[in-house]
Image (cartoon, rainbow, N blue to C red):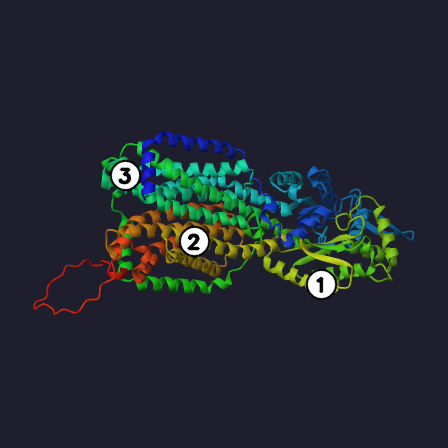
Amino acid sequence: MSLFRRWGEFVVRHPVPLIAGVLAVVAVLGVGALRLRLNVREQDQLPQGHPFVQVYNRINQLFGGGAAVIIGVVPRSGDVFTPETLAKVARITSKLEAMPELGRGAVWSLAAGRVKRIALVADELDVRQLMPEVPNDTEGLRQLRAETFADPRFVGALVSADGRAAAVIADFPTEAEGPKLQEKLEAIVAPERDVQTDVVIAGGPVIVAALDRAAAQMAILFPIALVVIALVHYEAFRTLQAMVLPLITALLSVVCALGFMGWLGLPLDIWSAITPVAILAVAAGHAVQILKRYYEEYAALRDSRAAVVSSVAHVGPVMVTAGSIAAAGFASLATFDINSIRVFGLLMATGILSALVIEMTFIPAVRGILPAPRQREMRREQDERWLSDALRRMAEVVVRRPRVVVGVAVLLLAVALVGAPYVTVDNSLRGLFPASGQLRRDDAVVNARFAGASTLRVLIEGEANGVLEEPDVLRAVADLQRFLESFPEIGQTVSVVDYLKQMDRVMQGDGGPKDSIPASRRLVGQYLLLYSMSGPDDLSGLVDAGYRQGAILAYSKSDETAFAERVFRRTREFADERFRLLPVRVGVAGGSVGAQAALNEVVVREKIRNIAQVSAIIFVLSALALRSVVGGLFVLVPLAIALGITVGVMGWTGIWLSMSTAAFMAMGVSIGADFAIYLIFRLREELARASLADAVSRALVTSGTAIFFVSSAVALGYLVLVCSGFKGWVHLGGLTALIMALASAAAVMVLPALVMLLRPRFVFPAAAQPPAPRVQKPRRAPSSPSRVPSRRGAPSPGGRT
């Protein structure tokens, strides 16, 4: 405290230079904040070191694409084989093919140049574009319909099985995803919508654009959170001056964190976009602690500058300890194998450290030059309100019935943990959006009419060129396709094998086998050569030029984790057995489904590791600050209770553990540690001048008040996210509010109850630890009893009451 007292004295002697210095640093960082741009990138959301994602990236590098958009053209009556509907398909296809964003991608549709029908003309194999122009006569429409349904490659992918919907598939490179791409797609399809025809859009780029729009809501949600937190602070102090000062501090901290992020060139995306609300709430909450103490010290000293020094001396050590623990907890997220979470952790750590510096410089400096509080201001701040009365009653319960308090907490934890095994781990991006929204409705249409809106790609790599021309290898690939299609969620698969089968089927005629692989490598080579001479190369997305590497593209109607984990596990087992004697390797889990499965696995593994990391950090720093191993364990108790109950609630209510909801754990554990630290430090301070029972009561009324307002600011600030309608933020806001409420309640009730029961030595200052009693010979009792005054709750030898 002497060190912080000297710092407080320095602040009140030089307030203006300190204020100017803080504002100058904030201004420089604020320039960096102007460089920030909202940019939701798929690669930032995926664990790049995971084998599934590595296969995904390798397939994208080899064959292009990776971000498939499925545009469904659905006439409200009749089928798609009319000049009007086919003209819509042709116009959409033409505009997509002209997009520069397509890059190495491709477009498939009934009207696409790379989509070719295979027929036998004059006993020769004839390969040409399926629909070079829109037929206007009945015979042309009939022939197009016949040729389309005669080829299994088209049915389910480009036209629905009943012929009542047509699809245009554009496979963009993943780097093209974003709101600009979505805007261009909407501009292409909008003119084709009319009273006779619905046009829907689904696929990965649509989801990425929707995530971008969700993140943009922060421009509206942040001011709302600011107002909510301001109202909480007004309730805390009942003065405008004390309400505004924490908010200014919090806003300066937000600018510092965002500016730091901008200068480093880090991306602002769906997850880092929520950090301003968190930093605002946490920074303003810490400011409440020091201002509450200032008013308390001023009431005793009646000297504003002396009150500033005293409040810095008393609260400074606690703020530095709590802020360092919270910042270190968030910084530990840098170990995540997901860039978006790493940026989130770095931004939160930077914001909290910025808030800590500002609160130890700017707030006391400003408070030192402001006029002393007037009597009316002091009366309003000290008015007895419902909270003080509630905390006194709570203190009475804790002091008189500590075993009941601990027992109730243990019972609630036990009941909640029964639901913990039911927590489902899932990272379906579609599931983050409301079922009634346009994205989910369009997605449902595509899944109902076509093979599926999600993709899965399997990589086949041979040991030498030409391996994918070997009939034995091709038969194994065909078997793997049939195995994938045995899953109800897989609507269709496509590989080079399907092209070879169709050519062989046509050449064999009506009497030949319907699902055969060409019998010899020579025949395979002839088919492939003939096909390559027919125009635009539509095989480049399925096989390389040397026929050494190829891919199976599967369309899926689900991207949920339970399905993904099941299909990948069983596919690996099948591939290991079926390709065991062949000179090829099979890499499973490319495509959007594989990426989601990888994300799911990493969230579980990394979150368990991160909770252990944060707990270890909190334990070590708390033990060092309190100079007690037992003290470190005490700090963890409220966090363990809050986290356990919250996870149990997730299980009982069916809320997924996903990348979005996993963030609340970091929030709850890192910030929740502050509550226990503030209470323990205040309890130790009060024990220097009061009995244990009185010290608990005073600590709950003083520090407990600040804890209530800090947790309320964080909880209510995050509850604003519920208004977003984006399920990821709705769950994050609700769970963060819950864990904040539980952590603060456990800190002000369970922690002091444990102190009452266990009398840990680290809580009692050295002066309150009486020396061990000397062993004396018994003396004869006096004839008349003497009354010895005693103080209820005074610590007895050994620190026990």
Query: Callout 3: helix, strand or loop?
Result: helix
Task: Give the mark nearest the N terminus, 3 or 2.
Answer: 3
**Residue 582, image x and y in percent?**
78, 61
Q: Can residue 325 be seen in this view?
A: yes
Q: Which of 748 and 137 is in front in this view?
A: 748
Q: Which of 43 and 176 is in front in this view?
A: 43
Task: Give the mark nearest the N terminus, 3 or 1.
Answer: 3
Residue 119 - label: none
Residue 307 - label: 3
Q: What residue type is labelled 1?
A: Asp
Badge 2 crowding class, 10 Å Cα cut-off, few under 14, some 14 to 19, many 20 or more, is some
In the rendered view, would you say 356 is above or below 429?
Answer: above
Residue 576 - label: 1
Can you identify the residue that label 2 sits on?
620
Q: Nearer the viewer, residue 431 or 477?
A: 477
**Residue 761, image x and y in percent?**
32, 58
- Which quadrant: the C terminus? bottom left
In the rendered view, would you say 361 is above or below 431?
Answer: above
Image label count: 3
599 sits left or right of 706 in the view: right
Q: Nearer the viewer, mark 3 or mark 1?
A: 3
